[in-house]
Amino acid sequence: MSVLALQFGQCGNQLGHSLFRLLEEDQPGLHRWFVPQGGAEWRPRAVLVDTETKVVDAVKGSFQGVGVVAPPLGGSANNWACGYTETGPLLVEDVLNCVRVEAERCDFLLSFLGLLSLAGGTGSGVGSRVLEQLRLDYPKKTLVNCVVLPHPTGEIATQGFNCLLSLARMYPLAQATVLLGNAPNRALALQLAALLQPLPAVSVAQLCAQLAPHPGLRLLQVRPPSEDAPHYALKRLMAGPSQKVVAQALIQRGDAPLPAALQRQFVQSVEGVDWVPQAQIGRIWRTDRGLLGRPRLLSRVSNSGGLAPLDALVSDAWGAFTHGAYVHHYSKFGVDAQWFLDAFQDVEDVLGAYRAL
Ligand SMILES: Nc1nc2c(ncn2[C@@H]2O[C@H](COP(=O)(O)OP(=O)(O)OP(=O)(O)O)[C@@H](O)[C@H]2O)c(=O)[nH]1
Ligand SMILES: [Mg+2]
């Protein structure tokens, strides 16, 4: 039950670096993420992709023996169109060759994990291009795409466009898209480990099938996990405005099971959509194993409304588009107004489906 991570751009590679460091500490999950090298040696099962060398050079000490595709092209200029139409096509074949080598090494390659930021040019544009080809080459494999959103204040003038164009392309390719707010990598890596480390009877494919049962509603949000005593942990994880939920799971790791009364409280507190049976809306998954030396950890993942950061990004992008700002940077790579209009339509369809829950 192996997972292959595809790390794109600065953010994807730095987040992947943090994630694999955590996973290495958590020995029992090694087979899912690492390739045995003989003796006590393991190496991450990953492919590192970038359009410049700086970031992969900085992390590659932890990725000895891993496929790296990072020619010195000088980056993708914070521009989805550059990544998708110019640098991406130069890289895609080499990346897919690395994927094939990894797939042949696995007894059973079950799933892919994408790691990238939606805001830059490489993660968003090269990521879109490569994941499209990956979907064609591996039509039946599960892809969980973990995407980091930019800070709302806006570090990159074109981040709204890059988010829009890349979401429109990548959303249909993945069984689940995990939206990550921009936070320190170690915190994000812990959220991902709490979600994706092995759970009895819940493979990565089952996790997606149970949490994202409808193709039009495949966005997942993860709360930072809590080590507190169950009552406080649950309170913290359930805090915030209540949202209509398509599916949601509480993941308990460790030796202290959540008392039955709290389990009931969780299941009953979920306001589910009426077309999914109540019993399938609030799930509780449990393993006796703690995580990363923590004796207990409770986390929550939900597929629900409450997508304000994405709404804001798309609305910023619409504002910039209607003023014609920066559009010429995209049209010079062949991405004209019609691409934008199609992307607005596709992303609005998804956001509209969540608003209508
Ligand atoms: N959480 C987190 N965010 C990061 C990291 N590095 C970059 N970012 C965010 O990612 C966005 C920029 O994307 P990058 O990953 O730097 O861009 P890229 O994919 O390398 O694309 P180009 O550099 O344009 O070729 C911004 O929102 C940054 O805040 C990181 O290590 N962790
Ligand atoms: Mg970069």
Image (cartoon, grey):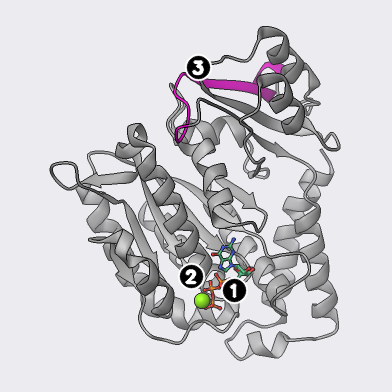
Q: Nearer the viewer, mark 1 or mark 3?
A: 3
Gap between marks 2 and 1, in whole Å?
8 Å
- From the viewer's perspective, is 39 left or right of 20? left
Crowd rating for badge 2 (residues with CA inside 10 Å; few <14, some 14–19, many 20+): many
Question: Callout 3 environment at 10 Å: few (<14), some (14 to 19), or many (20+)?
Answer: some
> To which quarter of the image does residue 47 belong?
bottom left
Image quadrant holding the C terminus, namely: top right
As drawn, the label of residue 255 is 3
Please name the amino acid that badge 2 sits on.
Gly
Distance, label 1 to label 3, CA atoms, is 41 Å
The vertical placement of 144 against 320, above or below, is above
User: What residue do we see at 43% from left, 22% from top?
Assistant: 200
Instruction: Note whether ligand 1 is within 8 Å of mark 2.
Output: yes
What's the residue type where badge 1 is placed? Answer: Gly
**Residue 220 spot, x, y in % from top left:** 64, 43
Marks 1 & 3, CB-CB < 8 Å contact: no
Residue at numbered disc 1: 120
- The extreme left residue here reads 38
Assess whether residue 311 is covered by the magenta stretch.
Answer: no
Q: Quadrant of ligand 1?
A: bottom right
Foreground pick, 292 / 213:
292
The residue under the point 51% across, 80% down is 85
Q: Residues within 10 Å of mark 1 (few under 14, many from 20)?
A: many
Looking at the rendered structure, the secondary structure element under dot 1 is loop
Q: Is residue 281 magenta?
A: yes
Outermost residue to the top: 260
Say whether disc 1 or disc 3 marks the residue closer to the N-terminus: 1
Q: Nearer the viewer, residue 342 or 185?
A: 185
| The magenta segment | 278-293
Give the side of residue 287 with respect to residue 244, left or right.
left
SS type, badge 2: helix
Q: Which residue is mark 2?
A: 9
